[in-house]
Amino acid sequence: MIPWLSNDTPFPSVERALRSPNGLLAAGGNLSVPRLLAAYRSGIFPWFNPGEPILWWCPDPRMVLIPGELRVSRSLARMLRNGRFEVRCDTVFEQVMRGCAAPRAKNRVGHPGGRDTLLIKPLAIRLGEPTTLAESLVMAEPADCGSGRPAALPAPEGSASPCQGGTWIGEDMIEAYCLLHQQGYAHSVETWLDGKLVGGLYGVSIGRMFYGESMFSDVSNASKIALAHLARQLERWRFGMIDCQMNTPHLASLGAREIPRSEFIATLQELIHYAPVTDWKFASDLFT
């Protein structure tokens, strides 16, 4: 069983997280700024279906990307150098979140764009009453919508699948992370083409630690361009890790790797105590 949190209940030790489903730690609580910051500082993140109780996770092992270990293919390197795309930070944070939340299927027609998650959350959730919450969770294979990529959180039984537009980023998540953004903790990295937002990512920054949440592409490689700029700039700022949360082949192909949860938490506790970066502007010579 997992504990049910009231709004002022502290998180349990991450060592109490379930092995199956991997990393499920607690349920309940809220998405206030103090609660979210306490979660991220402890290596915990929220993930749940809209309209259902909040679930808190800390999987073992943990997927991370060391900024200097990002793998850039030759084709991506050419795109990064040719200047066709413009990359901006924090100009349309809510729009990026809504891009990540938008139905995937709309971006599968006519071009190889689509929705990715920087973290990929590959479980379907069905919730019962709080007293039997852990027993009511069921595992499911990740959907790929014909794209070869894992989907975001599949919908519960009886609701729309991700191929039909399901998403785990609901209005309560958007509101909560926009508040984090207003207080300087959440950031967006945006890929623009001909004056239009075509991809990007968002996440949370504390000290020299970045927690990736989600990314999207409306044109091919737009999210990879955002991630490449983020990783290169974080390397210059001497950030230690980008948290990707869960393992997927897509993340591994970009250089992310798994580390034990104990190592993740120990490294995290060092990184979060550095002074924060207060001016989120990317250098213009990252790929020149």
Image (cartoon, grey):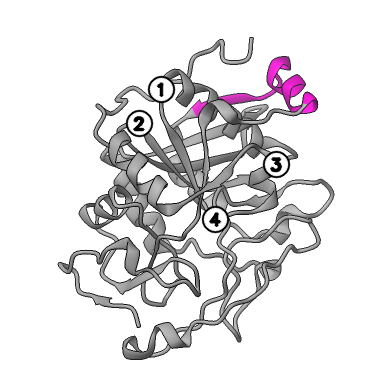
User: Position of 146 compared to 131: left or right?
Assistant: right
Q: Which residues are magenta?
A: 74-88
User: Label 1 belongs to which residue?
Assistant: 238
At a point 56% along the width and 47% down the height, the residue shown is: 118
Of the residues under marks 1 and 3, which one precedes in the sequence?
1
Mark 3, residue position? 253
Q: Is residue 80 magenta?
A: yes
Disc 2/disc 3 C-alpha distance (Å):
24 Å
Q: Position of residue 278 (x, y in %)?
A: 29, 25
Spatial CA distance of label 2 from label 4 is 20 Å
Q: Mark 4 falls on what kind of element?
A: loop
Q: Residue at x 44, y 32 (%)?
A: 91
- Real-space Cα distance between discs 4 and 3? 14 Å
Q: Amino acid at mark 1?
A: Arg
Which image quadrant is residue 190 in? top right
Place of residue 232 in the rendered image (x, y in percent of width and height, measured from the top left): 54, 23
**Callout 3 secondary element:** helix
Q: Are marks 2 and 1 in contact (CB under 8 Å)?
A: yes
